[in-house]
Image (spheres, rainbow, N blue to C red):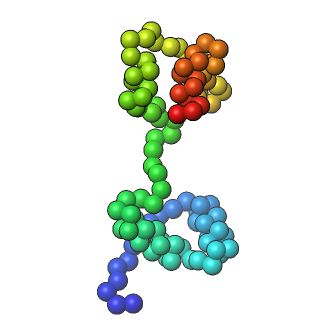
């Protein structure tokens, strides 16, 4: 290959074995998969998937701000995973916003 560069990365052995098995099923090898990934990054001008903090708190949008403006704050229960649970009986308008958007 003319005009190429070498890219190296250290990865966990287990991850390498898992990805090699996956890529083998897809008819790919790791270098080809990396080239595909980098090509998609350039085409999309960013990563080809969403990146976010796990369990991050979403910033309220304008519709939510209008809904809660001038209203007392609502304390929501959370499930075992820490996700907010909106009680339809206690907070019908908030429930409607969450479910129907």
Q: Quadrant of residue 21?
A: bottom right
Which of the pair 84/15 is nearer the observer?
84
Residue at 65% over, 68% down: 22
Quick one: which residue is furthest to the left in this view? 3
Residue at 34% over, 90% down: 2
Q: Is residue 57 above or below residue 47?
A: above
Which of the pair 87/36 is nearer the observer?
87
Q: Is residue 34 above or below residue 48?
A: below
User: How many discs mark residues in the rendered view?
Assistant: 0
Quick one: which residue is furthest to the top in this view? 72
Residue 84: x and y, percent? 57, 25
Q: Is residue 24 left or right of residue 74?
A: right
Residue at 45% over, 33% down: 58
Residue at 45% over, 74% down: 35
Residue 68: x and y, percent? 43, 18
Q: Is residue 81 left or right of residue 70?
A: right
Residue 77: x and y, percent? 60, 18
């Amino acid at each position: 290959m003319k005009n190429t560069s070498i890219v190296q990365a250290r990865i966990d052995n287990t991850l390498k074995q898992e990805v090699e098995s996956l890529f083998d099923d897809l008819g790919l090898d790791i270098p080809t998969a990396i080239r595909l990934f980098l090509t998609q990054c350039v085409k999309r001008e960013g990563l080809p998937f969403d990146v976010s903090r796990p369990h991050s708190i979403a910033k309220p949008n304008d519709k939510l701000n209008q809904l809660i403006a001038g209203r007392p704050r609502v304390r929501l229960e959370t499930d075992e995973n820490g996700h907010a649970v909106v009680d339809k009986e206690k907070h019908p308008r908030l429930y409607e916003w969450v479910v129907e958007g």
